[in-house]
Image (cartoon, coloured by chain):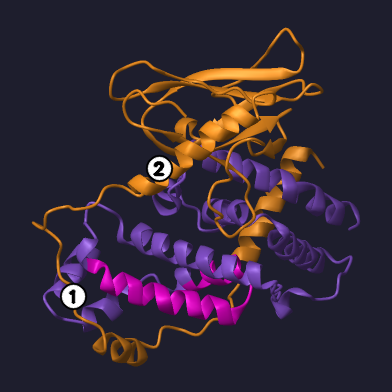
Amino acid sequence: MSAELRDEELERSFREAYRRPVPMPPLDEPALLSALAAERPPASSAGRPRWTGGGFMLSVPFAAAAALLLVLAGVLGGMALERRVTPTTPDSAQLIQFALVAPSASHVAVVGDFNGWDPRATPMRKLPSGATWTAAISVPEGRYAYAFVVDGRTWMPDPTAPLAPGDGFGHDSSVLVVPPGRSAL
Amino acid sequence: MTDAELVAKVLEGRTEAFATLVGRYHQGCARLAYRLLGNRQDAEDALQESLLRAYRGLGRYHDREMFRAWLYRILVNQCRTLGGRRSRDGRRFVHDPSATERPSRDWQEASVEIRDAFQTALDTLDPLLREAFLLKHGEGLEYGEIAAITGAGVSALKMRVKRACDALRPRLEEVWRER
């Protein structure tokens, strides 16, 4: 049997398994309507002024604290990480330099919210020293989660940057805060 | 009647229209919650809370979106929250008892064996990988829809599905070889 046929068979088996009935009760409409009776009726938000930004907006205190942490990480962990921010335009994207010490790696990439977590998008370059990998990309103002992909299979957070807030699933990624204007990490 | 028309009726105060609306997607939501969380109790909790949240937030729903995707997004977020809480509590997933039939050499039963392996392998997947894999290969959604549901980019989702497939394949091939 060819690998292709086998894959098809596995996919078919999975679809069949997924479609098997699950031991969940059907919708209990009277119970639902009873629960909704205790709720305030929903109202359309059309025409209401927007007062909040997107889900990635940071509060000022948190942004300041995160930026301060990153500055400290950059200073104290300078041997392992060098990440510089250079304004490219006054108010938007800034050039972010990522670095990772991985002497035994044969390929390293940085992935994050800024490049769709695509390991092909931002490969890193090995410095002549042979131990440090770097990449510089332009990133707009905002807060991003990111990680490194070593040899295409090992995902790891930046060892010298703050971990991203836990998503509850044990995923390790780091936080990058690109502040507005000309300030640096 | 379209989903958008039902939403409009709910917003006019016709609460019963909400039951009609979510009744269209209840079975799929129940299946997804169960597959994501691995046990009935948590899945029922997540689904019930999701329906209430959908009702409360219906005013923010815009009919340019697919209602199903909007509802799935609420459900997936609820499952993430509940799954994370369970993970922190150290609670183990309870597997579907019906997925533990005795293995056999017979083709039909071998197929059952593979389904068992899928179930077991699914439960060992990283939750985000499992979520992307189930939405893609279980619910059969397009990556664009999954992106709208999960908030992740299409490239990231493709990577998650690929990693899920890579993790599942050796486990299933092992079962396949033993047939």
Q: Secondary structure at mark 1?
A: helix
Residue behind mark 2: A63
Residue behind mark 1: B10
Magenta stretch: includes residue A183: no
Label 2 sits on what residue type?
Answer: Ala
Q: Position of residue A74 (x, y in %)?
A: 58, 29
Q: Which residues are magenta?
A: B30-58
Which quarter of the picture shows residue B54? bottom left
- Camera sees residue A66: yes
Q: Position of residue A142 (x, y in %)?
A: 38, 36
Q: Which chain is orange?
A: A
Instruction: In the rendered view, tell whether residue A3 sits above or below residue A107.
Output: below
Residue at far left of view: A47
Chain B is shown in which shade?
Answer: purple
Left or right: residue B32 versus residue A149 is left
Chain letter behind tag 2: A
Q: In this view of the protein, which residue sits in the foreground, A140 or B151?
A: A140
